Image (cartoon, rainbow, N blue to C red):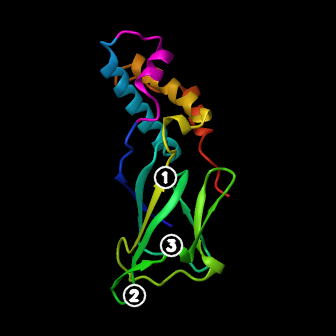
């Protein structure tokens, strides 16, 4: 299933505080706070793009041209999923229709991925043949910085240090070890 992702509501905070990042960087001066704050944002964005992980609660929209074949679940591309907020689609007759979230089942696997399927494996509704006929709004991420598991905090701190130390140098490549570390955070599909 091909889809597009859009952030509807950005996180209200960063997954690490400025104080936590400064402690990790052994920085106690305030004159670099803006650079450190930028490094936190850059590292967070990079980690989220590489892993599809969303560290802090945000609203995301998935759009697709149609539902998958009957009996096929939709694997949600972002994680961890807290809730399905809305599912809408353009029906075969052209009307915009809301699919009751109670009619779908949200299943989370041990690897962090979530998928949705119609309850009792009922077929998905038929959509009109039109771009972006299906819209799924989800809430993803951890509640706040204190609830982000340590397994994600350590690589984030390492990335913050890399971006901070190399600020202003856009030609520096990310060390392979950092890329490998982050790649291992991406949950496996079932």
Residue 38 to residue 99: above or below: above
Is disc 3 surrounded by few (<14), some (14 to 19) or many (20+) residues within 10 Å? Answer: some
- Which residue, given by chain and number where applicable, does mark 2 sit on? 92
Which of the two marks, 2 or 1, is nearer to us in this view? 1
Could you tell me how far apart the alpha carbons at marks 3 and 1 are, in whole angstroms? Answer: 16 Å
Horizontal and vertical percent position of residue 115: 59, 63
Instruction: Name the secondary structure under disc 3.
Output: helix
- Which residue, given by chain and number where applicable, does mark 3 sit on? 101
Q: In the visual, does 6 lie left or right of 162?
A: left
Residue visible at 55% across and 77% down?
Answer: 103
**Whether residue 168 is visible:** no
For marks 3 and 1 on the same chain, the one whose residue lies earlier in the sequence? 3
Which of the two marks, 2 or 3, is nearer to us in this view? 3
Magenta span? 14-29
Horizontal and vertical percent position of residue 27: 42, 11
For marks 2 and 3 on the same chain, the one whose residue lies earlier in the sequence? 2
Residue 87 to residue 125: above or below: above
Could you tell me how far apart the alpha carbons at marks 2 and 3 are, in whole angstroms? Answer: 20 Å
**Whether residue 145 is visible:** yes
- Which residue, given by chain and number where applicable, does mark 1 sit on? 140
Horizontal and vertical percent position of residue 104: 56, 73
Horizontal and vertical percent position of residue 158: 52, 24
Instruction: Name the secondary structure under disc 1.
Output: strand
Instruction: Name the secondary structure under disc 2.
Output: loop
Q: Quadrant of the C terminus?
A: bottom right
């Amino acid at each position: 299933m091909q889809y597009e992702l859009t952030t509807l509501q950005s996180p209200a905070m960063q997954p690490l505080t400025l104080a936590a990042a400064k402690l990790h960087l052994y920085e106690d001066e305030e004159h670099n706070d803006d650079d450190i704050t930028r490094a936190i944002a850059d590292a967070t964005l990079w980690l989220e793009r590489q892993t599809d992980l969303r560290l802090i609660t945000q609203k995301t929209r998935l759009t697709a041209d149609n539902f998958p074949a009957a009996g096929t679940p939709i694997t949600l591309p972002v994680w961890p999923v807290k809730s399905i907020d809305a599912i809408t689609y353009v029906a075969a007759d052209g009307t915009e229709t809301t699919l009751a979230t109670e009619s779908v089942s949200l299943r989370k696997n041990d690897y962090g991925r979530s998928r949705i399927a119609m309850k009792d494996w009922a077929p998905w509704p038929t959509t009109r043949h039109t771009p972006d006929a299906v819209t799924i709004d989800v809430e993803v991420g951890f509640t706040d910085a204190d609830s982000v598991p340590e397994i994600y905090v350590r690589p984030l701190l390492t990335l913050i240090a890399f971006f901070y130390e190399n600020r202003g140098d856009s030609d520096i490549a990310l060390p392979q070890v950092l890329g490998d570390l982050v790649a291992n955070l991406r949950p496996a599909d079932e």
